[in-house]
Image: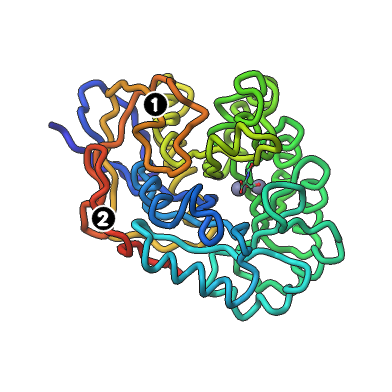
Amino acid sequence: MWAIFYPIGEPFRLSFFLSMITLPGLIDPHVHLREPGATHKEDWDSGTAAALAGGFTLVLAMPNTQPPVTDGDTLDQVLDAARHKARCDYAQYLGAGQHNPDTLVPLASRSAGLKMYLDQTYGDLRLDDMGLWLAHFAAWPRGMPIVAHAEGRTLAAVILLSALYDRPVHLAHISRREEILLIRAAKQRGMKITCEVTPHHLFLTQDDLSGGRGEVRPRLATAADRDALWANLEVIDCFATDHAPHTLAEKDAPNPPPGFPGLETALPLFLTAVCDGRLTLEDLLRRMVTNPRRIFNLPEQPESWIEVMPDESWEIRAENTFTRCAWTPFEGWQARGRLSRVVLRGREVFRQGQILSPMGTGKNIR
Ligand code: NCD
Ligand code: ZN
Ligand code: ZN
């Protein structure tokens, strides 16, 4: 069996001569782990098991829990759960709220960054008052990341704030043609913005799923929007799953919550795209390792890697996943390329579909 350690920055082509390739552990800068408050959907145990089963050795967790992570007490509470339960490395975002621009400042260095919800989505963290946007931009320490959920015209507004305050802003889950073109234009002007796109916005459209199961924010878009994301791949800094688990009972009930699980399907979908020639392995690693590491100022994980069988064909099935929500929008999809092993800081943590790391082995990288 051949094993190749893939050095980032060098061109690489999948070859059928290779029965196994070794890649760095992946980084997901956008996951929802639901603890505290909704551990029937996910918790730090099941969510970080899903991360490892998807090839991610480091995840950044969003603050729209119940209660949301908006002060020292809630940050301590979530980090305590993570310390006892996480199976992969992690950091936790703080949520921008109505009363906390100044009180977040001393907590910043213990967080992944500041998350600002500027449009309606799951949870109560939305900031409608633009005065509060200014207060958070003014107070949050320079050098610590800001991530914004901003769609359409709101996206244009937050890009202006990035320019006015002359500070980097990372734009979450970009989904539409007009948005990626706006970001392209802003980057051409040298603005300090970066962006991520989810697998579901790259592989699905509004015609693929209906009813509650199709609810996600930003909404699934048209084939023209999806194609514009692929056509502007060089504008996309990161692939982020926006792993947002809700149970099927919740998705199929009235007022379904928006969100898809994504941790366990991202790598196989992108490996399949590599196999189909839509992406190179270098494109993938830049967006799932090197760019997130740079944008969020994350440490390298020593003695950590993942092993992939590039030629293995298999079918995505929710029954084989670790996420507690127990469904996937990619049910029945054929994938080419399968994760076989994950090593985290010298320890084998996943092998052939089994999670081997005990709870509590994940490290807070902040
Ligand atoms: C996310 C969730 O469920 O927490 N839902 C979603 O549809 N993406 C919230 C978010 O990321 O906006
Ligand atoms: Zn969002
Ligand atoms: Zn999200």
Residue ID for mark 2:
357
- In the rendered image, the vertical position of residue 95 relative to residue 353, given as above or below: below
Identify which residue is drawn at 51% across, 72% down: 77
The answer to whether residue 286 is visible is no
- What mark, if any, has residue 316 been given in the picture? 1
Amino acid type, mark 1: Ile
For the residue pair 3 and 153, the one nearer the viewer reads as 153
Q: How crowded is mark 1: few (under 14 residues within 10 Å), some or many (20 or more)?
A: many
Q: Indicate the position of residue 46 as horizontal and vertical percent values.
A: 40, 50
Q: Earlier in the sequence, mark 2 or mark 1?
A: 1
Q: How crowded is mark 2: few (under 14 residues within 10 Å), some or many (20 or more)?
A: some
Amino acid type, mark 2: Ser
Q: Indicate the position of residue 266 as horizontal and vertical percent values.
A: 45, 36
- What mark, if any, has residue 140 been given in the picture? none
- In the rendered image, the vertical position of residue 45 relative to residue 250, given as above or below: below
Identify which residue is drawn at 21% across, 52% down: 348
